[in-house]
Amino acid sequence: MLASPVPMHIPDGFLSVLVSVTLWIVSVLVIAYALKRVNADLDERRIPLMGVLAAAIFAAQMLNFTVVGGTSGHLMGAALATILLGPWAAILVMTSVVGIQALIFQDGGLLVLGANIFNMGIVGVAVSYAAYQLTRTLLRDTRRTVLIGGFVAAWLSIFITSLSVALQLALSGISPANIAIPAIGGIHALIGIGEGLITVSALGFILAARPDLVRNGMARPVGGKVVLGVGLGAALLLAVLSPLASAHPDGLERVAEQQGFLSAARTPAFTMIPDYVFPGVSNQNAATILAGIVGTVLVFAVALGIAYTRRRKPTPTTEK
Amino acid sequence: MHVHFLDPYRPRPSLVHQLDPRIKLVLTLSFILTTALMPQGAWPVYILLLAVMISVVLLSELGTGFVLKRSALAFPFVLAALPLVFTGPGPSLGETMLGEWTLRISQPGLERFLSIAFKSWISVQAAIVLATSTPFPQLLVALRAIKTPRLLVAIFGLMWRYLFVLADETLRLIRARAARSGVSAQGEVKPGGSMLWRARVTGGMAGSLFLRAFERSDRIYMAMASRGYDGEVRMLPLPALKPVHWVILGAGMVLFAVLLAIAYLL
């Protein structure tokens, strides 16, 4: 249905608490700044526009086309939103899309929502903006340039976002960098082509029907230079960092080990899988398991008790 | 056809449904944070966490089968952590030959992989209970209570309001595409031109969807303006929290703290 086949929405449990919290802080700061910027525009028309466009991006993710075999391409939408709305509003729109996907459809976790907003909302938008503006500045600003810029922006936004996801996974000690980065990056270099093609066709359609919209979106992006710099910086940094991290995973892994495997070392009482037998359980562990089972039964009893007392009362059921 | 099935809210006369959305949101977030903070391989505490989760699911009267089915959503991502099993340090649990590669199953790696999968699974369940037991407008109230900026909450609200309208619009586009595209009865004849052509068609649909959204937002703005909208988002003040809510919140926090303490100190 709406579940994305693209492993871009990180679920809870996959990022270390440190990485999640750091990225939450970064995202909150950027969103606060974007809100300020959008408010400074003083265009009250933009609020319904952003809400409805966020809904449109969400709905557009239902549109897919067959690539080969069972795989299908579909839209993330960061590039399209950036080109049509400008960077600040696009950050808010993507934040809403990613936020609702996590809150309502469990597409991506809540604790890692900050990281997901960072990847798809902030990195995706900044990279799209930088790529689009640079293409248009380097080439002459014609209809074709808009389309080329759209393709580059869309492809880069997917590719760089995926590198960012891979790096965060590696930093959290989930996947080793030398496996995660080529695998995730490689898949998304292909998926990005689909995103690029859809974005270009959509832009072509809008250029034909309402050319003013494409022009308006980029008319006067306040603080655009900052986004351009950040987007370019993020793209370059991730593009340079990823092969490095992938070639020398030791550095990243050391960080990851300090974070992840350290907590394993801290709790020797729970090494339930002893060195010599895998399924075997030693006596001490049997006791802890027993305690666990007793606790479970207790909690269940309380819950069932409460549920039972409530079941007695005939309650008006409002079935859907 | 309408896509109301998108709305995950399932009304039930349960205690979990009646709980104040603000408390529910904070408790859910704390539960997920507690799960994330758990050391890996603390299986007895994991079992307790699972017990707490299952109790809440039972109390919410949503049906365990329903929650379990929905929680399978996060599983594809587990693939990302799979390499851990083979690349982790420590003693080996055996080797498998896979073509030319020899895969060495590492014991700490396996333990870490299982911990991650479990944590992710249980966190998704908490999020599912929150989303299916709370109507979205109430979640917006809760978001405001935890100091989400008003403008952002307003965009969330508008997005939610028009999500179903635009999803219907998308379904109409998809149906129109399907109606115009012939499908061969013979399996070997591939439907629908080259990949480029298919992408073009889909892109055109996306573009047309965006234009319709633009035009709709214009009409919405006009309707809002004619009803006195001046760019300021006004919302009703939040109702006060009753003492019993604070007790529930406190009890939840104490429970999470105790679980964490058990996991780290035992």
Image: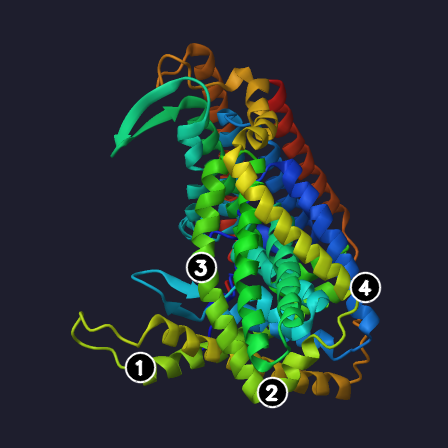
Residue A142 shows which numbered tag?
none
Tell me what residue is drawn at x 61 percent, y 70 percent. Answer: A81
Circle 2 chain: A
- Residues tagged by mark 2 and mark 3 found on one chain of the structure: yes
Q: Badge 2, how many Cα within 10 Å: few under 14, some, many 20+? A: few
Q: Is residue B259 left or right of residue A40?
A: left
Report which residue position mark 4 lands on: A36
* Residue type, numbered disc 1: Ser
* Residue type, numbered disc 4: Lys
- Residues tagged by mark 4 and mark 2 found on one chain of the structure: yes
Report which residue position mark 3 lands on: A191
Which tag is nearer the camera, tag 4 or tag 2? Answer: 2
Contact (Cβ within 8 Å) of mark 3 with mark 4? no
Report which residue position mark 2 lands on: A210
Circle 3 chain: A
Q: CA distance from mark 1 to mark 3?
A: 24 Å
* Residue type, numbered disc 3: Ile
N-terminal label among 3 and 4: 4
Circle 1 chain: B
Image quarter for residue A89? bottom right
Q: Nearer the viewer, residue A59 or B17?
A: A59
Q: CA distance from mark 3 to mark 4?
A: 34 Å
Q: CA distance from mark 2 to mark 3?
A: 28 Å
> Could you tell me residue A6's position as x and y percent?
46, 55
Q: Badge 3, how many Cα within 10 Å: few under 14, some, many 20+? A: many
Q: Give the colouring mode of the picture.
A: rainbow
Q: Badge 4, how many Cα within 10 Å: few under 14, some, many 20+? A: few
Up/down of B24 relative to B165, above or below:
above
